[in-house]
Image: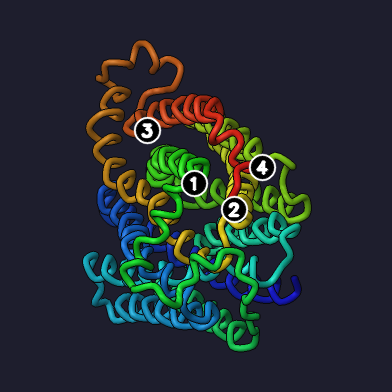
Amino acid sequence: MPTFIFLWLGQTISLIGSGLTSFALGVSIYQTNSSIAQFSLIYFCTELPAILIAPLSGAIADKYDKRWVMIVSDTGAGFSTLIMAWLFWSDRWEISYIYLAIAFGSLCRGFQWPAYYATPTLLVSQKDFGRANGLIQLGEAAAKLFSPALAGILVGKIAVEGVMGIDFASFIFALLVLAIVRFPKYTNHRNRDIETSQQTWWQDLTFGWKYLLARRGLFLLLTFFVVVNFALGITQVLITPMILGFANAQVLGNILSFGGCGWLLGAVIMSIWGGPKRRIKGIICGEIMLGCCMVIMGLKPSAILISITLFIGLFNIPIFVGCANAIRQIKVATEAQGRVFAIWGAIAYASFPLAYLVASPLAERVFNPLLKSDGRLVNSLGLIMGVGETRGIGLLFVTLGIAIITIAIAAYQNPDLRYVEDQKC
């Protein structure tokens, strides 16, 4: 556990640095041209390359030393950030260059995450999987808590390129940690038939998919996350334009930071508690609570209301994500985790790029016109939710929240998913 905590610290510092760059870039680009489409493409380029490379990155994580996979990946991501900082500093940046740099950083992250998520099974005992995953979620919570507030302050003082310089320094710190730690080699194979030494690269690339198809409970859990992640992806893109529709960037940063406090608190509790005994219940209940918060969040253009519901909604994420990760780590043989986790991530997160692409047309062409001053719902829902250029996004949030609640309740009715923890590996 001490070795894992040291490794986690380095990755968390790096994650906070990346969060600074992400927030600074997003706000800067949106305020420059007020384009939801260009803002959405930032998220698209952040996710899609990592998803496309997942089968290869998972095979590499299983075949080679996970520590070296993480070192090479972090080095590439740091180089990407350095290039973006130079473009801004020399005033040569164009939006297409930024998209390319972000996409390259995403490729590096695609190789890094399968190795990182498999480290708990190498470094901690099975009874501590929940706590280790809670720490991973705690790192993501710290990024959501500190990055928006710090970036909002730093952009005005050292500009976007200065923020990226801090991000690059965080990569250096993560690399120093990786240079110090050592991972033990796993030798006690649970399933000799899935050992990788005699498999071809093509077999490795398709292995994760076949492994999940053969285990119905895990496959249904994955399908559930695909659908829910689509709704979350739309929310992730549109919460910034919705808030900037009635507030400034400082208020936006404060709201996101307060929401990050919820994620932080949930992650702390998860790292100490380890999750409920029946982890599938933690997943379903957490998703239902998240859906309720999305419904309330969209009802009024109120900074206080959005802050509170965002806090509660994000509080649940490290708990149900930690429960899902623990189920995977227990049910998937250690020597297969790189490939299975990579294909799991690719499929589960594939709905995010799709959500980023449809978020803009859904908001600008479908929902926002309904609640503008001359919209069709001004005299009905407009009396409850308010009227304005971005109030349609609030209506979209309500719709997505109801969808998440319905899907979570329906998913739990399937016995294969409800008893996934009891099924044989």
Residue 16 seen in the figure: no
Mark 1–mark 3 distance (CA, rounded to whole Å): 38 Å
Count neighbours of disc 2 (C-alpha within 10 A) and say few if under 14, some if 14 to 19, many if 20 or more.
some
Q: Is residue 7 above or below residue 353?
A: below
Q: Is residue 105 above or below residue 384?
A: below
Q: Is residue 74 left or right of residue 176?
A: left
Whether residue 185 is visible: yes
Determine whether label 4 and label 3 are within 8 Å by CB: no
N-terminal of the pair, mark 1 or mark 3, is 1
The residues tagged by marks 2 and 4 sit, at their Cα atoms, a distance apart of: 13 Å
| Residue 68: x %, y % from top left | 50, 83
The residue pinned by badge 3 equals 393
Foreground tag (4 vs 3): 4
Q: Residue, x 57% and y 40% (percent of image)?
A: 310
| 100 vs 112, nearest the viewer | 112
Q: Nearer the viewer, residue 154 or 422?
A: 422
Residue labelled with disc 4: 279
Residue on which disc 1 sits: 215
* Residue positioned 24% across, 65% down in the render: 95
Q: Are marks 1 and 2 in contact (CB under 8 Å)?
A: yes
Q: Amino acid at mark 1?
A: Arg
How would you rate the neighbour count of disc 4 (Cα within 10 Å): few for under 14, some for 14-19, many for 20 or more?
many
What is the distance, in whole Å, between disc 1 and disc 2 at their CAs?
Answer: 10 Å
Check contact, mark 1 vs mark 3: CB within 8 A: no
- Residue at numbered disc 2: 331
- Residue 303 location (% of width, % of height): 54, 37
Return the residue nearer the eye: 69 or 334. Answer: 334
Q: Secondary structure at mark 2?
A: helix
Label 3 is placed on what type of residue?
Ile
Q: Residues at badges 1 and 4 in contact (C-beta under 8 Å)?
A: no
